[in-house]
Image (cartoon, rainbow, N blue to C red):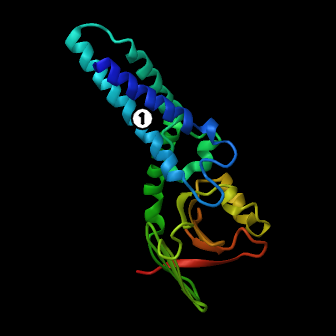
Amino acid sequence: MTNRIALYVLLAALLLAALTNRWMARGGGPAFNIVSFDGIYFLAQWVAFAMTVGALLLLLDDWRDTGRFPRLILLGVALLAFFIATGIPLTQAAQEWKSGDVGLTRWLRLLQERKAENAIAPTFLGTWKSATRSYVIERDAVVVRGPGGTVSFGAERCPTGLWLSFHHATDVTFHFNPAAKDYAALLAGPPIPALEVACDGDLYTFLRLPDGRTIVFHGLQNPNPWSETLSRES
C-alpha cells in the first residue's frame, strides 16, 4: 500500500516536473505577455519538489519496516536530482531561469550576491546631500528631494517595477555611456561599490570611487546624464 501511494505521488510530481521545466518555457511561458502566471508556474515546481521528498520519506520508512529495498526510491532520487540540477527557480529571475540559470548553481550564486549586498549596503545607507538635492537611502527604498520636488523609489510608487541593487560596478553599470567613460576606466582598479535604483525608466546610480568620493548619476541609460558629488549628512 505504501509503495502504491508513493508511486502515485511520484507520478504526479513527474507530471508537474514535465509541465514546469525550463524547456517547456520556450516562447511566452512561464512569463506570459499580458497576465503573468509566474507565481503559479513556479509554485508548481515547489509542490512537485515537496511531493518527491514526501514520497521518498514514505519509501524509506517502508524499507525500514520490511527490510526490502523499494525500487521506486531510484525514481524518487532521480527526480530529486532533476529538480536540484534544473529546477526550483526563483520567481523574480524568470527570464534567467528560461535561459538556463537554474538549480543549485543559481541558489549558490544568489547566496554570494546577498553576501556582497550586505557588505556594500552600509557604504550608501543614510542621508546624503549635494549642492541642490538630498538623498535618503534605505535597504529597500530611496527618496530624492530637490528643486523639482520629492521623488520616492519604493514599493508604494513601484509595486511591480522597483529595481534596487547594491553591487560592485561593471561596464553594464555605466551602460557604456561615453559621458561616464572616465569613471568606467576606474574599473581596472579596486572594486567600486555601486547602488542602482530604477523605476519607470528613472535611474539613479550611486558610486563610491577609489579616492573616497561618492557621486550619483541620473539617467546613465540616456545620452545626456547628469552627475553630482555627495557628502554624507552627519
**Is 37 placed left or right of 115 in the picture?**
right
Task: Reply above or below: 231 against 183.
Answer: below
Q: Position of residue 209 (x, y in %)?
A: 59, 65
Q: Quadrant of the C terminus?
A: bottom left
Q: Position of residue 179 (x, y in %)?
A: 77, 70
Horizontally, is 189 left or right of 212 in the view?
right
Position of residue 30 relative to residue 139, above or below, is above
Give the SS element for disc 1: helix
Q: Residue at x 67, y 49 (%)?
A: 28
Q: Is residue 91 left or right of residue 201?
A: left
Question: In front: 13, or 53?
Answer: 13
Looking at the image, which residue is at 67% across and 42% down?
Answer: 26
Q: Say if residue 113 shows up in the picture.
A: no
Q: Vertically, is 9 above or below 139? A: above
- Give above or below for 199 relative to 96: below
Figure disc tally: 1
The residue located at (48%, 29%) in the rendering is 14
| Location of mark 1 (residue) | 49
Observer-nearest of 232 and 217: 217
Q: Residue 32's quadrant in the figure?
A: bottom right
Residue 152: percent from left, percent from top: 51, 79
Which residue is at a point 44% across and 71% down the rendered structure image? 138
Q: What is the crowding at mark 1: few (fewer than 14 residues within 10 Å), some, or many (at least 20)?
A: many
Q: Position of residue 105 (x, y in %)?
A: 52, 36
Residue 80, by quadrant, is top left
| Type of the residue with mark 1 | Phe
The image quadrant where one finds the N terminus is: top left
Q: Is residue 202 visible?
A: yes
